[in-house]
Image (cartoon, rainbow, N blue to C red):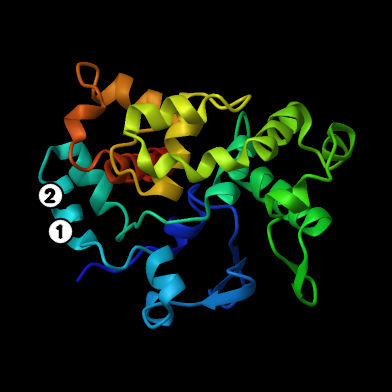
Amino acid sequence: MIEENLRETLLGGQSFSWTEDEDGSFWAVLDERVVRIRTLEDAASDPFLYDYFDLGYDYQKAREEIAAKDSILREAVESSGLIRLLHQDHFLTTISFILSQNNNIKRITGLYHRLSERYGHEVEPGKYSFPSPSELASADEDSLRALGVGFRAPFIIDAVRKAALLDTIDSLSFDDAMDALQTIKGIGPKVASCILIFSYQRREGFPLDVWMKKVMKEYYPDKDPSYFHPYEALSQQYLFSWIRQKG
Protein backbone atom coordinates (compact mmCIF):
# COMPACT_ATOMS: atom_id res chain seq x y z
CA MET A 1 0.00 0.00 0.00
CA ILE A 2 1.25 3.49 -0.92
CA GLU A 3 1.52 5.89 2.01
CA GLU A 4 -1.13 8.61 2.15
CA ASN A 5 0.23 12.12 1.54
CA LEU A 6 -2.14 13.71 4.02
CA ARG A 7 -0.18 16.95 4.10
CA GLU A 8 -0.50 17.49 0.34
CA THR A 9 -4.17 16.53 0.40
CA LEU A 10 -4.96 19.01 3.17
CA LEU A 11 -2.50 21.85 2.52
CA GLY A 12 -1.82 21.55 -1.22
CA GLY A 13 -4.52 23.90 -2.48
CA GLN A 14 -7.75 21.88 -2.30
CA SER A 15 -8.77 23.31 1.07
CA PHE A 16 -7.83 26.30 3.20
CA SER A 17 -9.51 25.01 6.37
CA TRP A 18 -6.58 23.07 7.79
CA THR A 19 -3.69 23.99 10.05
CA GLU A 20 -0.68 21.76 10.72
CA ASP A 21 0.53 21.62 14.33
CA GLU A 22 4.15 21.18 15.36
CA ASP A 23 3.56 17.52 16.21
CA GLY A 24 2.54 16.75 12.61
CA SER A 25 -1.19 16.53 13.29
CA PHE A 26 -3.80 18.67 11.55
CA TRP A 27 -6.92 20.50 12.74
CA ALA A 28 -9.83 22.30 11.12
CA VAL A 29 -13.25 23.55 12.17
CA LEU A 30 -15.74 21.45 10.22
CA ASP A 31 -19.19 20.05 10.89
CA GLU A 32 -19.65 22.42 13.87
CA ARG A 33 -16.62 21.01 15.70
CA VAL A 34 -12.87 21.05 15.76
CA VAL A 35 -11.59 18.04 13.83
CA ARG A 36 -8.11 16.79 14.74
CA ILE A 37 -6.35 14.04 12.80
CA ARG A 38 -2.88 12.59 12.45
CA THR A 39 -3.65 9.81 9.95
CA LEU A 40 -6.73 8.77 8.00
CA GLU A 41 -7.26 5.96 10.49
CA ASP A 42 -8.57 8.76 12.70
CA ALA A 43 -11.28 9.47 10.08
CA ALA A 44 -12.42 5.98 9.05
CA SER A 45 -15.00 5.48 11.80
CA ASP A 46 -16.50 8.98 11.56
CA PRO A 47 -19.30 9.19 8.92
CA PHE A 48 -18.68 12.89 8.20
CA LEU A 49 -14.93 12.41 7.76
CA TYR A 50 -15.39 9.18 5.81
CA ASP A 51 -17.33 11.19 3.23
CA TYR A 52 -15.08 14.27 3.49
CA PHE A 53 -11.97 12.22 2.69
CA ASP A 54 -13.80 10.17 0.04
CA LEU A 55 -12.71 6.96 1.74
CA GLY A 56 -15.08 4.83 -0.33
CA TYR A 57 -13.21 5.54 -3.57
CA ASP A 58 -10.34 3.30 -4.73
CA TYR A 59 -7.49 5.82 -4.89
CA GLN A 60 -4.86 3.08 -5.00
CA LYS A 61 -6.30 1.75 -8.27
CA ALA A 62 -6.72 5.24 -9.72
CA ARG A 63 -3.13 6.14 -8.81
CA GLU A 64 -1.78 3.01 -10.53
CA GLU A 65 -3.78 3.65 -13.69
CA ILE A 66 -2.70 7.31 -13.83
CA ALA A 67 0.95 6.31 -13.44
CA ALA A 68 0.65 3.78 -16.27
CA LYS A 69 -0.51 6.40 -18.77
CA ASP A 70 2.85 8.07 -19.54
CA SER A 71 6.27 8.82 -18.08
CA ILE A 72 5.39 12.34 -16.91
CA LEU A 73 2.38 11.12 -14.95
CA ARG A 74 4.45 8.26 -13.56
CA GLU A 75 7.04 10.74 -12.28
CA ALA A 76 4.31 12.99 -10.87
CA VAL A 77 2.64 10.09 -9.06
CA GLU A 78 5.91 8.64 -7.76
CA SER A 79 7.07 12.03 -6.45
CA SER A 80 4.36 11.95 -3.79
CA GLY A 81 2.33 9.49 -1.83
CA LEU A 82 -1.36 8.97 -2.35
CA ILE A 83 -3.40 12.16 -2.82
CA ARG A 84 -7.16 12.30 -2.31
CA LEU A 85 -9.85 14.70 -3.54
CA LEU A 86 -11.72 16.26 -0.64
CA HIS A 87 -15.53 16.48 -0.51
CA GLN A 88 -16.18 19.88 1.07
CA ASP A 89 -19.17 22.06 1.85
CA HIS A 90 -20.53 23.88 -1.21
CA PHE A 91 -20.60 27.43 0.18
CA LEU A 92 -17.29 27.13 2.02
CA THR A 93 -15.61 25.87 -1.17
CA THR A 94 -17.16 28.56 -3.34
CA ILE A 95 -15.96 31.41 -1.12
CA SER A 96 -12.56 29.72 -0.64
CA PHE A 97 -11.91 29.61 -4.37
CA ILE A 98 -13.17 33.15 -4.90
CA LEU A 99 -10.46 34.08 -2.39
CA SER A 100 -7.95 32.02 -4.39
CA GLN A 101 -7.99 34.32 -7.41
CA ASN A 102 -4.56 35.90 -8.05
CA ASN A 103 -3.46 34.64 -4.66
CA ASN A 104 -1.22 32.07 -2.95
CA ILE A 105 -2.08 29.31 -0.51
CA LYS A 106 -0.64 31.03 2.57
CA ARG A 107 -2.53 34.25 1.98
CA ILE A 108 -5.78 32.49 1.02
CA THR A 109 -5.62 30.53 4.28
CA GLY A 110 -5.11 33.75 6.22
CA LEU A 111 -8.14 35.36 4.57
CA TYR A 112 -10.21 32.22 5.20
CA HIS A 113 -9.44 32.36 8.92
CA ARG A 114 -10.07 36.11 9.16
CA LEU A 115 -13.50 35.63 7.60
CA SER A 116 -14.18 32.82 10.07
CA GLU A 117 -13.17 34.89 13.09
CA ARG A 118 -15.14 37.95 11.93
CA TYR A 119 -18.35 36.32 10.67
CA GLY A 120 -18.37 32.71 11.87
CA HIS A 121 -18.99 31.54 15.41
CA GLU A 122 -16.74 30.11 18.08
CA VAL A 123 -16.96 26.33 18.50
CA GLU A 124 -14.01 26.03 20.89
CA PRO A 125 -12.01 28.80 22.55
CA GLY A 126 -10.17 30.56 19.73
CA LYS A 127 -11.54 28.22 17.04
CA TYR A 128 -14.20 29.56 14.65
CA SER A 129 -16.48 27.98 12.06
CA PHE A 130 -16.46 29.25 8.50
CA PRO A 131 -19.46 31.58 8.16
CA SER A 132 -22.70 30.32 6.69
CA PRO A 133 -24.45 32.36 3.97
CA SER A 134 -26.74 33.90 6.60
CA GLU A 135 -23.78 34.86 8.79
CA LEU A 136 -21.84 36.34 5.90
CA ALA A 137 -24.92 38.24 4.70
CA SER A 138 -24.11 40.94 7.27
CA ALA A 139 -20.86 41.79 5.45
CA ASP A 140 -20.56 44.79 3.16
CA GLU A 141 -17.78 45.64 0.74
CA ASP A 142 -15.99 48.01 3.09
CA SER A 143 -15.86 45.53 5.97
CA LEU A 144 -14.65 42.76 3.66
CA ARG A 145 -11.97 44.97 2.16
CA ALA A 146 -10.86 45.84 5.70
CA LEU A 147 -10.13 42.15 6.20
CA GLY A 148 -7.88 42.19 3.14
CA VAL A 149 -10.00 40.49 0.47
CA GLY A 150 -9.49 43.41 -1.91
CA PHE A 151 -11.15 43.23 -5.34
CA ARG A 152 -12.85 39.96 -4.33
CA ALA A 153 -15.27 41.75 -1.94
CA PRO A 154 -18.13 42.24 -4.44
CA PHE A 155 -17.67 38.65 -5.66
CA ILE A 156 -18.17 37.35 -2.12
CA ILE A 157 -21.29 39.46 -1.67
CA ASP A 158 -22.74 38.17 -4.95
CA ALA A 159 -21.96 34.57 -3.93
CA VAL A 160 -23.84 35.11 -0.66
CA ARG A 161 -26.85 36.49 -2.55
CA LYS A 162 -26.82 33.51 -4.93
CA ALA A 163 -26.04 30.83 -2.32
CA ALA A 164 -29.27 28.95 -3.13
CA LEU A 165 -27.84 28.29 -6.60
CA LEU A 166 -25.26 25.98 -5.04
CA ASP A 167 -27.98 23.50 -4.07
CA THR A 168 -28.99 23.06 -7.72
CA ILE A 169 -25.56 22.13 -9.10
CA ASP A 170 -25.72 18.40 -8.31
CA SER A 171 -28.60 17.95 -10.73
CA LEU A 172 -26.75 19.56 -13.67
CA SER A 173 -24.38 18.16 -16.25
CA PHE A 174 -20.74 19.18 -15.87
CA ASP A 175 -20.95 21.82 -18.61
CA ASP A 176 -24.22 23.24 -17.30
CA ALA A 177 -22.80 23.28 -13.77
CA MET A 178 -19.75 25.19 -15.04
CA ASP A 179 -22.06 27.74 -16.69
CA ALA A 180 -24.26 28.07 -13.61
CA LEU A 181 -21.34 28.72 -11.27
CA GLN A 182 -20.00 31.38 -13.63
CA THR A 183 -23.19 33.41 -13.15
CA ILE A 184 -21.68 34.37 -9.78
CA LYS A 185 -19.58 37.50 -10.21
CA GLY A 186 -15.87 36.86 -10.42
CA ILE A 187 -16.09 33.11 -11.01
CA GLY A 188 -14.42 32.00 -14.23
CA PRO A 189 -13.67 28.53 -15.64
CA LYS A 190 -10.73 27.76 -13.34
CA VAL A 191 -12.57 28.63 -10.11
CA ALA A 192 -15.77 26.91 -11.28
CA SER A 193 -13.81 23.75 -12.06
CA CYS A 194 -12.16 23.79 -8.62
CA ILE A 195 -15.54 24.16 -6.92
CA LEU A 196 -16.96 21.23 -8.90
CA ILE A 197 -14.04 18.96 -8.03
CA PHE A 198 -13.55 19.81 -4.37
CA SER A 199 -17.19 20.16 -3.36
CA TYR A 200 -19.30 18.20 -5.86
CA GLN A 201 -16.90 15.33 -6.62
CA ARG A 202 -16.97 16.02 -10.35
CA ARG A 203 -13.86 14.08 -11.27
CA GLU A 204 -13.80 15.35 -14.87
CA GLY A 205 -12.74 18.83 -13.76
CA PHE A 206 -9.30 20.03 -14.82
CA PRO A 207 -8.51 23.53 -13.50
CA LEU A 208 -5.91 25.46 -15.45
CA ASP A 209 -4.01 27.90 -13.25
CA VAL A 210 -0.54 29.31 -13.99
CA TRP A 211 1.16 26.06 -12.87
CA MET A 212 -1.07 23.78 -14.91
CA LYS A 213 -0.88 25.97 -18.02
CA LYS A 214 2.89 25.53 -17.75
CA VAL A 215 2.50 21.74 -17.48
CA MET A 216 0.22 21.55 -20.49
CA LYS A 217 2.41 23.83 -22.61
CA GLU A 218 5.69 22.08 -21.79
CA TYR A 219 4.66 18.43 -21.47
CA TYR A 220 1.29 18.02 -23.22
CA PRO A 221 1.27 20.61 -26.02
CA ASP A 222 -0.91 18.48 -28.28
CA LYS A 223 -3.30 17.26 -25.56
CA ASP A 224 -6.41 18.58 -23.82
CA PRO A 225 -7.93 17.48 -20.48
CA SER A 226 -9.79 14.59 -22.14
CA TYR A 227 -6.41 12.86 -22.49
CA PHE A 228 -6.48 12.21 -18.72
CA HIS A 229 -9.94 10.61 -18.71
CA PRO A 230 -11.34 9.10 -16.51
CA TYR A 231 -8.98 10.66 -13.95
CA GLU A 232 -8.86 14.29 -15.08
CA ALA A 233 -9.16 15.87 -11.63
CA LEU A 234 -6.87 13.46 -9.82
CA SER A 235 -4.26 13.60 -12.60
CA GLN A 236 -4.36 17.38 -12.31
CA GLN A 237 -3.70 17.18 -8.58
CA TYR A 238 -0.67 14.96 -9.06
CA LEU A 239 0.70 17.18 -11.83
CA PHE A 240 -0.01 20.32 -9.79
CA SER A 241 1.87 18.91 -6.80
CA TRP A 242 4.76 17.71 -9.00
CA ILE A 243 5.29 20.95 -10.93
CA ARG A 244 5.28 23.00 -7.70
CA GLN A 245 7.97 20.71 -6.29
CA LYS A 246 10.01 21.21 -9.45
CA GLY A 247 9.52 24.96 -9.20
Q: Quadrant of the C terminus?
A: top left
Note whether 112 is above or below 150 in the view shown.
below
On screen, residue 44 versus residue 183, left or right, reads left
Asked if the residue under mark 1 is in contact with the one under mark 2, i.e. CB atoms within 8 Å, the reply is yes
134 and 20: which one is in front? Answer: 134
Which residue is rendered at x = 24% and y = 53% of the image?
A: 78
Q: Is residue 182 visible?
A: yes
Side of 124 where 188 appears, left or right? left
Q: Which residue is drawn at the image coordinates 61% and 41% (left, top)?
A: 163
Decide: is 218 above or below 85.
above
**Residue 214 picture location, percent across and down:** 38, 24
Between 221 and 141, the residue placed more toward the observer is: 141
Please give the name of the residue rendered at 32% of the width and 55% of the height, measured from the top-left corner.
Answer: 80
Q: From this view, report whether residue 53 is shown above or below residue 198.
A: below
Packing grade of label 2 (10 A; few <14, some 14-19, many >=20) is some
Disc 1 on helix, strand or loop? helix
- Residue 210 in view (yes/no): no
| Residue 48 locus on image (x, y percent) | 46, 72
Q: Is residue 231 left or right of residue 189?
A: left
Quadrant position of residue 203: top left
Work out whether residue 180 or residue 130 is closer to the camera in this orientation and state it.
180
Q: Which residue is mark 1?
A: 61
| Furthest-top residue in this view | 222
State how many labels appear.
2
Picture coordinates of residue 219, whole percent (x, y): 25, 25
- Label of residue 65 in the image: 2
| Quadrant of residue 118 within the rendered picture | bottom right
In the drawing, does residue 53 fall left or right of residue 38? left
Identify which amino acid the numbered label 2 is placed on: Glu
Mark 1 crowd level (few <14, some 14–19, many ≥20, 10 Å Cα): few
Tell me residue 193's x, y (percent): 42, 34
Q: Amino acid at mark 1?
A: Lys
